[in-house]
């Protein structure tokens, strides 16, 4: 019960916007007036322009100046629809996550672009929300650094003398590097690890009873295709597996076990780009040949739901 309470409390302090959104964002501003400027906060900009605005639940006041006329506009704030959808997909507890977005104000925005129409009779700026655009291909010979969190993981391992061990859990960390040898093709070298942590939050756990833990450390080399917002990859993998069995304090006559193994196999991944740098996807690493503790044909695999950040350098 105590673990569940801790998990719920942490969940209530989490939302998609608090992870993916910054406190400010660039807002494009344009008008149909000639030789015009706009005042946002305490700064004046010549139009068209791009202004860094703060996320807030309060209306944004802007002043358009052209010829000898100064005209005030009000821009209403709103909750991002993408943020609401992501809260449902990733966290499941939509009302609680939405409350976090409201309190932190990271879920609000004023649209992607403002158009100040001098012929409008109402002093409200036209807010433009961009539709999803076709993803621009990366430049040839460009490099990216990847940081990802394999959030949810599934294991099928066959540790020596232990039979088949299946399990699922949370968390891990991977680092990788990409090289685009064409605008829509790239090679990726990745290394990381995953674990079957029992709850979806990184909090300390105290277990008095028996606990089985599955761990995989791996490196992959894949060839990948970028298809608009989607990417697909396939290649080779080398995996280090570990199966731990802690019998707990109540079974002091039993000796804890830790069984290790190494395997060679394939790697497959697919991702969908959600934001400018943020991607969600799945990674499947099957191995078919065990090289430790003995060489034999042996199928094992891991599957991960991955949250990936791609940083261009």
Image (tube, rainbow, N blue to C red):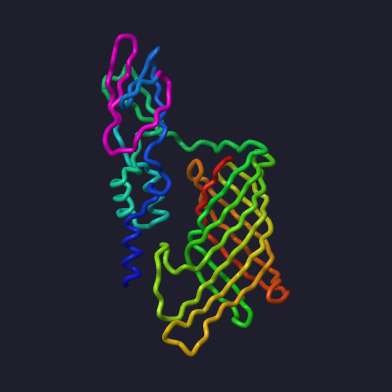
User: As displayed, is residue 302 above or below residue 207?
Assistant: above
Residue 43 occupies which quadrant of the picture?
A: top left
User: As displayed, is residue 55 above or below residue 69?
Assistant: below
* Furthest residue toward bottom: 253
Viewer-proximal residue, 195 or 127? 195
Q: Judge from the rendering whether residue 9 lies leftward or rightward of residue 305; answer left or right.
A: left
Viewer-proximal residue, 92 or 39? 39
Residue 262 occupies which quadrant of the picture?
A: bottom right
User: Residue shown at 37%/43% (left/top)?
Assistant: 81
* Furthest residue toward top: 68
Does the magenta portion include 64? yes
Viewer-proximal residue, 94 or 193? 193
Residue 215: x and y, percent?
55, 69
Does the magenta portion include 112? no
User: As displayed, is residue 25 above or below residue 208?
Assistant: above
Residue 266 occupies which quadrant of the picture?
A: bottom right
User: Residue shown at 37%/27% (left/top)?
Assistant: 114
User: As displayed, is residue 166 above or below residue 152?
Assistant: below
Residue 23: x and y, percent?
37, 40
Which image quadrant: the C terminus?
A: top right
Residue 130: x and y, percent?
44, 34
Q: Main secondary structure of the magenta part?
A: strand
User: Residue shown at 40%/70% (left/top)?
Assistant: 205
Q: Which residues are magenta?
A: 46-75
* Furthest residue toward right: 295
The number of numbered badges drawn on the structure is 0
User: Residue shown at 61%/74% (left/top)?
Assistant: 260
Residue 308: x and y, percent?
52, 51
Which image quadrant: the N terminus?
A: bottom left
């Amino acid at each position: 019960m105590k673990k569940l309470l801790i998990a719920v409390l942490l969940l209530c302090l989490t939302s998609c916007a608090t992870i993916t959104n910054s406190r400010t964002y660039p807002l494009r501003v344009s008008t149909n007036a000639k030789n015009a400027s706009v005042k946002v906060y305490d700064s004046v900009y010549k139009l068209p322009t791009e202004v860094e605005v703060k996320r807030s639940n309060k209306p944004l006041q802007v002043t358009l100046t052209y010829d000898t006329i100064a005209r005030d506009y009000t821009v209403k704030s709103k909750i991002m629809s993408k943020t609401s959808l992501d809260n449902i997909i990733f966290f499941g507890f939509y009302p609680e996550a939405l409350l976090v977005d409201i309190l932190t104000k990271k879920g609000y925005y004023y649209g992607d672009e403002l158009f100040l129409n001098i012929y409008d009779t109402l002093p409200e700026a036209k807010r433009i929300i961009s539709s999803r655009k076709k993803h621009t291909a990366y430049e040839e010979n460009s490099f990216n650094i990847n940081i990802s969190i394999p959030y949810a993981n599934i294991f099928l391992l066959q540790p020596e003398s232990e039979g088949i061990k299946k399990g699922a859990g949370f968390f891990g960390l991977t680092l990788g590097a990409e090289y685009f040898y064409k605008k829509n093709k790239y090679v990726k070298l990745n290394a990381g690890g995953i674990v079957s942590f029992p709850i979806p939050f990184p909090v300390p756990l105290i277990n008095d009873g028996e606990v089985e833990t599955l761990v995989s450390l791996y490196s992959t080399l894949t060839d990948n295709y970028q298809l608009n917002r989607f990417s697909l990859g396939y290649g080779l993998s080398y995996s280090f597996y570990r199966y731990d069995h802690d019998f707990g304090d109540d079974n002091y006559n039993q000796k804890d076990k830790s069984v290790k193994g190494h395997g060679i196999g394939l790697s497959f991944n697919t991702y969908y780009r959600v934001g400018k740098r943020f991607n969600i996807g799945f990674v499947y690493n099957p191995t078919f040949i065990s090289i430790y503790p003995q060489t034999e044909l042996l199928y094992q695999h891991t599957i991960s739901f991955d949250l990936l950040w791609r940083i261009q350098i």
